[in-house]
Amino acid sequence: MVQAKTWVLKQHFEGFPKHTDFELKLEQLSEPRDGEVLLEAVFLSVDPYMRPFSRVRMQAGDVMIGTQVAKVIQSNSPSFPVGCHVVGRCGWRTHTVSNGSDITKILDDWPQDVSLSHALGAIGMPGLTALYGLEEVCAIKSGETLLVNAAAGAVGSVAGQIAKLKGCKVVGSAGSDDKVAYLKELGFDQAFNYKTVPSLEEALKNASPEGYDCYFENVGGPFSSVAIPQMKTFGRIAVCGGISLYNDTTPQTGPYPHLQMIFKQLKMEGFLVGRWEHKNVESLKRMLTWVQEGKLKCKEHVTVGFENMPAAFMGMLRGENIGKAIVKV
Ligand code: NDP
């Protein structure tokens, strides 16, 4: 019998998460039955969505939600033989018994020299989010100018690089000078540290005096209030995330964007990556090809040890990561 380690949400977060909100628990797993497999986590993802979704999708005492790359170590399912790797919505657990409904096999032709951890990043959910936000929501075209914030993170760094591949001008904002240097390394045309610029408005104007056609929104709140007036007429805003709001105990209020949206005839659309799930296999293959061709760089911020899951999660929310925040068991 296998014993799984799990991280449980002890109590709902109030404001910024604290170590005491989490509890490490042991769970005895039963033997996998017909059609079931036993999984062992190899890499786990910590993502911003866990913060807002914990409130709406979890109760105190539940295992933290999340995705992992896991190895099949025991199998009673011909679809998932022993030794194969899957991406699973298993939550924060070292071992899981799955009936196959919440796991997907890693792409068949995954190359040996590409770490499987990227299946949680650029060649996974965050990469798909970047791709769909640009192609499906913004319908971005060559020659246009894109603004992306949280630009050195998992989604933002991929969004900026894809826009460059499509022949766009890309402006990125991020929260440290190291992150800004990384964005320049990735080929962003302009990048600035939103924490140290004297005026966000001036920084946005200097980076693109003619304004922005598309805005890939990861942050929300006051950043967005300053950015929206910099849009060009008929600009498109893909509302992917609002991380500056996730830890609020009292909701923030305006300035409200309505007049800007009317006068400039802007389109602003929220989206969830799952809307285009039917395109995932084809899209992941595209992303993998870009990675192999060296056109898409995917840095990771790796924390070692399952026991460090809460620290990795809180570190990511604080902005400690450049690229995708990953935990290696
Ligand atoms: P990141 O890798 O970008 O990590 C989060 C980053 O957010 C931090 O590194 C930090 O960077 C930045 N940040 C944290 N707090 C603030 C703040 N108060 N103001 C501005 N920036 C802040 O995470 P992801 O790439 O995984 O996610 C980016 C966004 O995309 C999130 O909002 C997330 O919820 C959203 N998302 C949406 C999906 C969808 O389907 N709609 C799917 C996946 C993600 P910095 O140092 O630059 O501040």
Image (cartoon, helix red, strand yellow):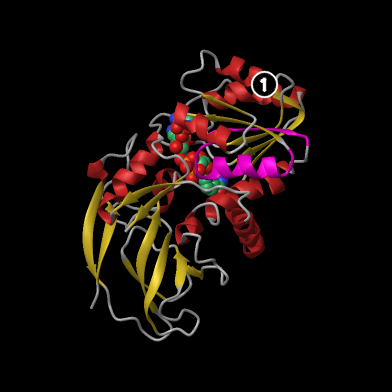
Image coords of residue 20 (percent x, y): 22, 43
Q: Is residue 251 visible?
A: no
Position of 220 with respect to 9 (left or right) is right
Residue type at mark 1? Pro
Q: Residue at x 34, y 35 (%)?
A: 16
Image coords of residue 58 (percent x, y): 38, 53
Asked whether 177 or 46 is in front, the reply is 177
> How crowded is the residue under tag 1: few (<14 C-alpha within 10 Å), some, or many (20+)?
some
Q: Residue at x 31, y 64 (%)?
A: 94
Asked whether 242 or 69 is in front, the reply is 69
**Is 124 placed above or below 35 here?**
above
Asked whether 51 or 162 is in front, the reply is 162
Image coords of residue 167 (percent x, y): 74, 40
**Is 220 placed above or below 92 here?**
above
Q: Is residue 14 visible?
A: yes
Image quadrant in which you'd find residue 320: top left
Q: Which residues are magenta?
A: 143-167
Q: Quadrant of the N terminus?
A: bottom left
Image coords of residue 183 (percent x, y): 55, 34
The residue tagged 1 is 229
